[in-house]
Amino acid sequence: MWKSLKGWLASVPIADPIERKSAVFLQLVLAYEGLFVPFNKIYRRWFVDSALGGAPDYGNYAILVDNLTDAGITVAAWVAFALVRRGNFRGASITILATMWCSMLLAYATFGYAVMPTDETAMEVLVLATLLLGKRALWTTFGVICGSLLLAMTRDAIASGDWSANFWRSYNEFPSVGASYVAITLFLNQLNYSLRSALSESEARGRALRQEVAARERSQAALLHTRKLEAVGQLASGVAHDFNNVLGVIQGYARERFRVMTGRASQGDDVERLQDALEGIEEAADRGAAVTGRLLGFSRRDTGAVEVVDLAAVCASLTTMLRQLLPPGVRLQVAPPSQPLFVRVDRNELDLAFLDIASNARDAMPRGGCFSVTVTGGACVTIQCSDTGTGIEPSVIERVTEPFFTTKGRGQGTGLGLSTVYGMLRRVGGDLRITSVPGQGTTIAMILPHADEPDDQVSVATSM
């Protein structure tokens, strides 16, 4: 129940962070004042005064002032509460404090210091002024308290009948009482300064942290874009090879035109041969469009979208992509899972991870070898990429996930591949494990948590 009430009290349209943090406290104080003052009046009139044989006779004017000040504070408390709910924190604070200042001045001037030498209301107003409006309101309240004490003591001196003769007797406690309020005000002033300074520093650190996070996100996006361009460059040679094959097919079919024109084919077969040639050209062009489409789609795909990915479908499209990257001397083996296996990951980053690992494997097998990809389930999903290359020294394995660390020569590597793969896995709750035997090869395992099978309405990323 308290959580629900606190949530409701906190749901106020206040932009200032310090005022927003104090809004719940202020509403509780206002509700307390709006309820306590009338209930306290009823309690004292009907129970305490009745038990003591009746209320002291201060006169009709004093009773009128007492009732008016209590009614004023009650009404002001609920008006201020409504102002806070509308987002006017400062207006609510000024409303309740100004009402309390006026009530204090009237009460002291009416009843005198002898009747109310120490009033807890003065301390309450000091604390409220400090927490709600700060230094200026605190010292204004101090001035109101001092003025109220002087009015009360002056009232006592006048009521004694001989103001000049009773001057010292009426005012003799003002220095000590005033000094006490000075000490309390100074303490609250320092407390206010410390609290507001701490809040300001906290907000400044929060803004700096948000700016740093935004800058890191921009840097990550720029880095990912750079890696995509590098990957596109690596894929380009394979795409060029495939496209040359497509062009060769188109040229072969186009030669049928010359055979028809030169009459080398029989007359009855001319139309049929020309029709077959045009169909072959169309099919070859479609394959060429598919090759370039994969490259363009890869380079344009947005990043940062974590989605449910079926690794069985990923493996089905993985062979073509990796075959374009690996040289003819490197044998490629892809072992997909026997059934759909779902993980939550950014598909674009997953493709880049495969390209980074395969690129490193290619560089580690200059004389050829074998690169294999195996996907298995279990407690977690494991994507195991192995090569039969030169391997990695144990001292190097400890550093391969460090940004910008590379053992390649100048211009051959950025040192960002495995570090970004590791970062991608950690962001989705996964991990990266590397084992290697120098001279025999390296195995890199990307470990990802299982994802629930999506509903039919939810799209699953499968295509390259």
Image: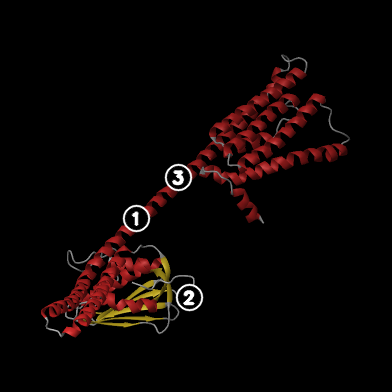
- Residue 3 relative to residue 292: left or right: right
Q: Is residue 114 above or below residue 47?
A: above
Q: Nearer the viewer, mark 2 or mark 3?
A: 2
Q: Real-space Cα distance between discs 2 and 1?
A: 32 Å
Residue 389 makes an appearance in the image: no
The residue positioned 45% from the left and 45% from the top of the image is 201
Badges 1 and 3: C-beta atoms under 8 Å apart?
Answer: no
Say which residue label 3 marks.
Answer: 201
Amino acid under disc 1: Arg
Label 3 Cα crowd, 10 Å radius (few <14 / some 14-19 / many 20+): few
Q: Nearer the viewer, mark 2 or mark 1?
A: 2
- What kind of element bears circle 2? loop
Image mark for residue 453 = 2
Q: Real-space Cα distance between discs 2 and 3?
A: 46 Å
Residue 156 in the image: state x and y as whole percent.
74, 22
Instruction: State the residue in front, 373 or 24.
Output: 373
- What kind of element bears circle 3? helix
Instruction: State the residue in front, 239 or 112.
Output: 239
Amino acid under disc 3: Glu
- Residue 394 relative to residue 425: left or right: left
Say which residue label 1 marks.
Answer: 218
The residue positioned 62% from the left and 32% from the top of the image is 181
Question: In which quadrant of the rendered view does residue 81 lie?
Answer: top right
Label 1 Cα crowd, 10 Å radius (few <14 / some 14-19 / many 20+): few
The residue positioned 38% from the left and 73% from the top of the image is 462
